[in-house]
Image (cartoon, rainbow, N blue to C red):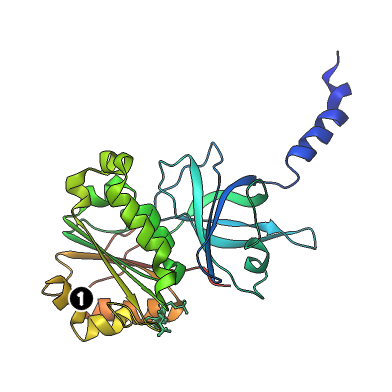
Amino acid sequence: MDMTEQKPVTQATAAKVSPMPDAETVTQVQHYTDRLFSFRVTRPQSLRFRSGEFVMIGLMGDNGRPLLRAYSIASPSWDDELEFYSIKVQDGPLTSRLQHIQPGDQIILKPKPVGTLVHDALLPGKRLWFFATGTGFAPFASLLRDPETYERFEEVIVTHTCRDVAELTYGRDLIDDLLKDEMMIELIGAENLAKLRYYPTTTREESPKMGRITTLLKDGTLFRDLGIDGIGPETDRAMVCGSMGLNLDLKEILEGYGLEEGANSDPKHYVVEKAFVG
Ligand code: A2P
């Protein structure tokens, strides 16, 4: 039979299964607080990315056009699915709706990963710092599960600052799992995981360590707590992901230590990226 005769039928079937372009299916959703949630979606078979990169994801807008925002991929590059960690903004155009997704729903995902929080943008060094605030932890959730992170450095220090203790949950659970999960221990290696140091702080709720990371760096508390002399361009590399304010303040601090900003085409000592907000 002539295949063209079947065309209308084929189109109708395809439209039913996949009503949106670049549609992926939600497989899991977890809510942490009234401001934070994470979710997992199916991964397009052809999608390759470097841990730390972001993609555009979103939903179809009421006007029939995709409403997309940049989201760091929180899952490692070897994972079968993709994971994202998101803020919920009650009047945010995308997250006011995205926060209601359920397993089985579809989201739009443009399979074109980009970003500067990648190993390629950093020169080799001894110590790697991840400085995150809020949902800025997401790219590090990917990098922390990538064996390359530990193979390239002798020490990996991750700081995460949030307003309150509940907002630290996503990062804390991820690191707990990393250190306990047999599959992760086998993949990354116990001796590699021993390089990891986690330094959570809160700014608005009492916790064992309080204060903005910028303050704790400037007054020397962070170095005293970790037993480190300081940060310098010979030994230290850093990745920064948080609010615009955090990024600018930390950039100034790191440059004050003599670190220079790197890029994919010009690897140096530190890299910065804005966490998705809104
Ligand atoms: P603070 O509570 O003092 O504003 P948010 O949830 O608003 O994105 O903030 C996440 C964390 O980042 C909060 O603990 C917040 O502290 C901290 N923060 C915000 N701006 C800066 C900045 N410019 N430097 C350091 N930390 C910051």
Does residue 72 show up? yes
Tell me the residue at 74%/61% (across/down). 61
Label 1, secondary structure: give it: loop
Q: Could you tell me residue 28's position as x and y percent? A: 56, 49
When the figure is inspected, residue 212 is found, relative to residue 174, above or below; the finding is: below
Tell me the residue at 86%/24% (across/down). 6
When the figure is inspected, residue 55 is found, relative to residue 48, above or below; the finding is: below
Residue toward you, 130 or 222: 222
Does residue 117 show up? no
Give left or right: position of 149 versus 24.
left
Give left or right: position of 14 versus 255.
right
For disc 1, the marked residue is: 258
Q: Quadrant of residue 171?
A: bottom left
When the figure is inspected, residue 146 is found, relative to residue 216, above or below; the finding is: above
Residue toward you, 271 or 169: 169
Give the number of callouts: 1
Q: Quadrant of residue 263?
A: bottom left
- Identified by mark 1, the residue type is Gly
Q: Could you tell me residue 236's position as x and y percent? A: 19, 66
